[in-house]
Amino acid sequence: MIRTKPKTTPVAEPDADRPAGSGEEWLGRNRSSKRRLWERLNPLSRKQIRIVAEALALQQTHAQLPEPLRARLSATLQELDRLVTRIRALLVEVARRAPPGP
């Protein structure tokens, strides 16, 4: 016979006549310092931190690849970097030649 666990709903207050969390926790004020720091950063900073974290994770993955695949990926990344540099230079030149806006 397959037994299923009875579904229980979370109770806001435990039976012991005390709140499940402090009043500060209920109001959302008792958060970790890391969480508060993350929330104080502006969205652009958070996006940049996330991109750096993803880049570090990808770099670790890259280091674990077999040598032939790692060499091809490195060559592709260098080519991509060269193209990005060229596009950046072209955009600067276009912005320099464009007439001033109204």
Image: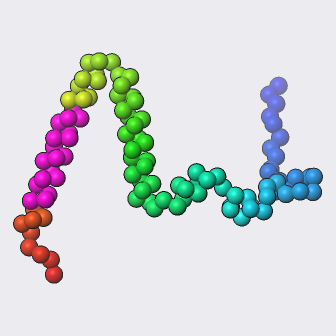
Q: Is residue 45 above or below residue 95?
A: above
Above or below, comparing residue 61 to residue 101 in the picture: above
Q: Identify which residue is drawn at 71% across, 64% down.
A: 27
Q: Observer-nearest residue: 6 or 70?
A: 70
Judge from the rendering whether residue 96 lies leftward or rightward of residue 68; answer left or right. left
Residue shown at 85% from the left, 57% from the top: 19
Let me know if residue 74 is in the magenta part.
no
The image quarter containing residue 73 is: top left
Q: Which residues are magenta?
A: 76-93
Residue 52, image x and y in percent?
Answer: 39, 44
The N terminus - image quarter: top right
Q: Position of residue 54 (x, y in %)?
A: 41, 41
- Residue 37, located in which quarter of the rendered image? bottom right
How is this picture coloured? rainbow
Say which of 100 and 32 sits in front. Answer: 32
In the rendered image, which quarter contains the C terminus? bottom left
> Looking at this rendering, what residue extends furthest in the left direction?
97
Judged by its main secondary structure, the magenta piece is: helix
Whether 92 is among the magenta residues is yes
Q: Which residue occupies 16% across, 47% down?
A: 85
Above or below, 57 relative to 95 = above
In depth, the one of 7 and 76 nearer the eye is 76
Snapshot quadrant of residue 6? top right
Q: Residue at x 38, y 23 (%)?
A: 64
From the viewer's perspective, tell me whether residue 97 is left or right of residue 43: left
